[in-house]
Image: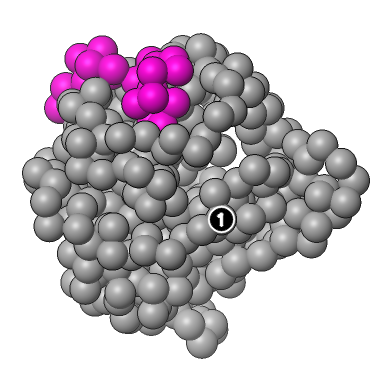
Amino acid sequence: MTDGSDTRPASDIATRKIDHLDIVLRQDAEPGASATGLDRIVFEHVALPEISLADIDLSVPFLGRRLAAPLLISSMTGGPDRASRINRHLAEAAEHLKIALGVGSQRVAIEGRGGGGLDRRLRDLAPSVPLLANIGGAQFVLGYGEDEAMRAVEMIGADALIVHLNPLQEAVQTGGDTDWRGVLSAIASLCSRLRVPVVVKEVGAGISPGAARRLVEAGVAAIDVAGAGGTSWAGVEAERAGDARRAAIARQFAGWGIPTARAIAEVRVACPTVPLIGSGGIRTGLDVARAIRLGADIAGQAAATLEAAETSGEAVVAHFEDVIETLRIACFCTGSASVADLRRARLIDPPDFAL
C-alpha cells in the first residue's frame, strides 16, 4: 500500500530530488556549516609506533560480511534519472574497495515513478559488499508496511533496510509529512517481521541517547547517528522554499541538531553493544578515525562523495582511496595496528563527551 494522500505528480518529486542534489553540492563546497565537533578530538601522537604502516588491518565485520575498511557510502539519492548514473558509480566503487553502500530513498521507485538506477543491476555491480535499502520512517504511518519494505529490499538485493528519520526536514518542507505518531511502533513491527536487519538513521540532526535506546529496544539492528555538521536539510529546504516566509523559518534551523561527535559518543555509552555508524559531516580519513575513536564501528560519508559520484566510478574510488590512506596514517601515528586498537588510542584534552 502507498500513501494515498500524496497527490503530487512524479515530475514534482523528481524536480525536488534534482534540486536537492544541486543544493547539497553547493552547500558542501561552502565553509561554515554547523560544526560536527570532530575537530575537538585530538589524538596523542606516538613517536614510536612499533608497527608497520603496510600491515595495519583496517578490516571490520558489518552485516555478516567483512569490509576492507570501516566505511559506508551513505544514502544520497534515489529518484531522478540523474541518480542512475550516480548509483552505478557508487556501486562500482563500493565493490572495488570492498566497502558498504546505502542507497537513497526508494519511495519514488516503489511507487513506480522512476527507478533512478535502483534495481537488481546495483547488486550485480556490487555482489560481495553490504547493500542497504532505504525508506523514510514517516511512510510507515502513511500506509507503508512489510510489503513495501520487502519490495525495497528485493528491488536491489539488499542485505538490510535503512529506515531514515527526517522530522525537521519534513516540518520545514512545503507539504512535508508531519504526523509522526506511531513511527516507533511501526519500526518495532517491521523489525519483528522483516527478513533482513533494520538500520535506523537520522539525516543530519543526530540521534539522542534516549532515542537510540528506544530504537534498540524496538529491535533495530544498527543505528546511524547522522549528526549535525554535514548537510543541513533545513538549509536545503530554505533554498527550495517557494516563498520568503517559509525560507526564513527553515533557515533558522540550518544549524539545528546534535553535533556528530557528541551523538556518536553518547549513543555508544547508551547502547554499548549496538553496531553504530558515525556519519554527518565526515569529510576525511581523519574524521573517520575520530568517529571510530568516539565509538562508531564504521563511518558513513555522503555529500563529500557526491561530486566524484557524478563523474565516474574511478573518481569515487580515488576519493575513498585518499580517505583510507589518511585513516591508515592516523592508525600508524597512534600506534594502532587495527581498528580495534584505534578505539583505545589516547586523546589530548578530550572533551567531556569523549570516552
Q: Is residue 130 left or right of residue 193?
A: right
Q: Which residues are magenta?
A: 105-128
Q: Observer-nearest residue: 263 or 113?
A: 113
Residue linked to disc 1: 178
Residue type, numbered disc 1: Thr
Q: Observer-nearest residue: 270 or 278?
A: 270
Instruction: Say which residue appears at 82% left-offset and 48% top-offset.
Output: 247
Q: Is residue 48 left or right of residue 171?
A: left
In the image, farthest residue toward the bottom: 352
In the image, residue 135 sits, relative to residue 16, either above or below, namely: below
Instruction: Give the percent coordinates (x, y) of residue 149.
Output: 25, 39
Instruction: Say which residue appears at 50% left-offset and 38% top-offset.
Output: 5
In the image, farthest residue toward the right: 244
Residue 132 in sight from this viewpoint = no
Q: Observer-nearest residue: 251 or 7?
A: 7
Among the 4 quarters of the image, the one containing residue 123:
top left
Question: Is-magenta flag for residue 260?
Answer: no
In the image, residue 26 sits, relative to residue 53, either above or below, namely: above
Instruction: Say which residue appears at 47% left-offset and 60% top-offset.
Output: 180
Residue 113 in sight from this viewpoint = yes
At numbered mark 1, what does the secondary structure look like: helix, strand or loop?
loop
Instruction: Give the percent coordinates (x, y) of residue 72.
Output: 35, 42
Neighbourhood count class around disc 1 (C-alpha, 10 Å): few under 14, some 14–19, many 20 upward: some
Q: Quadrant of the N terminus?
A: top left
Q: Is residue 315 left or right of residue 129?
A: right
Instruction: Give the percent coordinates (x, y) of residue 282.
Output: 51, 50
Instruction: Say which residue appears at 44% left-offset and 35% top-offset.
Output: 4
Instruction: Give the percent coordinates (x, y) of residue 303.
Output: 56, 38
Among the 4 quarters of the image, the one containing residue 237:
top right
